[in-house]
Amino acid sequence: MLIGTAGHIDHGKTTLVRALTGVDTTHLPEEKARGITIELGYAYAPVEGGNAADAARTLGFIDVPGHERFIPTMLMGASGIDFALLVVAADDGVMPQTREHLAILHLLGIARGAVALTKCDRVAPDRVAEVESDIAALLAPTLLAGSPIFAVSAVTGAGIDALRAHLNAIARDEARPLADAGFRLVVDRRFALPGAGTIVTGTVHAGVVRAGDTVLLARADGLRREVRVRGLRVNNRVAQAGGPGSRCAVNLAGIDYGEIERGDWLLTPQPARATDRIDLRLQLLPDGPRKLGQWAGVTLHHAGGHAMARLALLDGALEAGGLAPGASGFVQAVCDRPIFACCGDRIVIRDAAGSETLGGGRVLDPFPPARHRRRPERLAVLAVLEDPDRATRLAALVERAPCGLDVEELALAHNLPGRGLTDLLPAARHVGAKAGGCIFSPAAWAALGDAVLARLAAHHAQFADEPGVERERLRRMCMPQLTSAVFLARLEELLGEGRVARTGSSWHLPTHTVELSPADRQRADALTSHLLAGDCDPPWVRDLAGLCALDEAATRGLLRRMAMRGEVFQVVRDLFYPRPTVGRLCAIAAELAAGNDGRIRAADFRDRIGGGRKRAIQILEFLDRVGFTRRVGDGRGHAHVLRGEPPVAQD
């Protein structure tokens, strides 16, 4: 169990830890000279009074500085603790940092703790009773309400045994935390030891690290490096593994300690992603100085570091003129530098000068949208993310995503590497890595298929002479938010079920097809022969009718049926190109794009096909229409760029 001290400067936190463990946590010369704690200190003691399994457990103490100038250091120490030990001196009583440290513990969600009323040997019993009453009143509105108060003296030893026995009893009864998440540790110290090399220390926030593991050393500014864990000390003991809530000293191989900075993270090797904006539920302290208005500047503290941030109010607080002291609301924090955050992480907000704690809350979404963040449907998603049960939260989140959710982003946001999402959401539809890694609810996956079928039916009704719709064009018609890979996966499944068909690059309903009679087949072959002979300038319908001695209307109708079969393509009215010619035109366009920074200009295309500018523009507009290219720019600077698949599959 990891215990963090809290309290005002010079109230005896370090002395109390030494009395409980026999360890002096001060290690800097300046700390010893000034008699105050500046950096985090650590001490360990075995759990006493239990069975053999309990004897293997350890009480770990993090001693934090009490001076107001070192609140960021206190926040770093308190961010990973299991149990709070609030220290109040009987002679001073409740002081400013007592209140601020207690508020921080409350904002960090720490609900287990005890109070050590120190220096009781210096005051009369009635003073002890008075301060105890003040402390009980102070704790009442916080998560630590009702915590036991122990009157102690580190000088005489009075009350120390009772406090130690209480801490040991809590540790013996504590359930071991689940380690069903990715490994996360923020570095708070780094140094080198002769014969061992680089050592980093920190508190394990989630997951498990084992000797021999490969972990990712990541920094929000871009550092990503895989390193091997050579060895471990967990709670000051040599160990093979360290789990959530434990203090770990990690011996890293293959890296110099000078390359590591305080605040770096050790993570499960996976695509690490930092973020500079987070959506959260923010709770302001009741005794705050003022409302927080739209885009208020604050200091945001998270785990091992802090960033300056601006707050965008997302719900009713904006209409009320700001978030008032004691109120809570959804906000989006836009930070001046990226941080590593996951859903459920606790944050603390202080004023822009970093001198006063204003509030805190839980991270809901570390990768939120920058636009449409106040829409009702977005606020409904944030409400879902507040559910403390991870499986329920994720299931509801997937149900609210008609376009599915990106598997990698969802796993990173909720710290679930590997197959964690598959195990938690067995009923969801997982579209694998081949399709960009998305997850859909069964209803959303079915609705996507229905949307494809409905759109194809509408297109066939409107353009009966077209063979179908090219894939990328169909995606933009149905659901442009989807990635191409995911949409292709849905089409291929519909194809396998026989609900859609494909002719060349055109997708269509199975019923949208035309069979030619032997006589029409003979006429169609003759028309195709003349069209092929015309190369990039094939004859118009009226000329084809004359060449084949056919009625013009009958020729036009036959060409449209051929177009439905994908044998020819109508570029403009009454001008059809055969399939091989269209394939060659697409190849020419692709070559021009490759040789001209991705742009296809009408003049270059005209020169390659040997026709007039008007015909070149007609063909390029046809390629735009079928989704192979799209036009960019205006006037003399306009061009076309490749966009999707060609209407004729390339060999």
Image: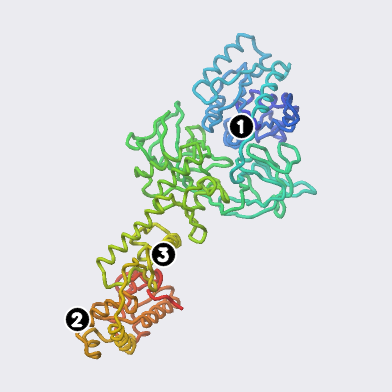
Answer above or below: position of 16 versus 565: above
Say what amino acid the circle numbered 3 marks.
Leu
Identity of the residue furthest to the right in this view: 195
The dot on residue 82 is: 1
Residue 38 occupies quadrant:
top right
Q: CA distance from mark 1 to mark 3?
A: 54 Å
Which of these two is toward me, 154 or 364?
Answer: 364
Q: Residue at x 52, y 59 (%)?
A: 433
Q: Residues within 10 Å of mark 1 (few under 14, many from 20)?
A: many
Say what amino acid the circle numbered 2 marks.
Ala
Residue 25 occupies quadrant:
top right
For label 2, the residue is: 553
* Between discs 2 and 1, the one toward the N terminus: 1
Q: Is residue 631 visible?
A: yes
Using residue 195 as the reference point, say whether residue 521 is left or right of it.
left
Badge 1 marks a residue whose secondary structure is loop
**Residue 6 location, x and y as percent?**
60, 28
For label 3, the residue is: 495
Badge 3 marks a residue whose secondary structure is helix
Say what amino acid the circle numbered 1 marks.
Asp
Residue 288 occupies quadrant:
top left
Q: Are marks 2 and 3 in contact (CB under 8 Å)?
A: no
Which of these two is toward me, 586 or 510?
Answer: 510
* Between discs 1 and 3, the one toward the N terminus: 1
Q: CA distance from mark 2 to mark 3?
A: 35 Å
**Residue 196 location, x and y as percent?**
77, 48
**Residue 625 location, x and y as percent?**
31, 71
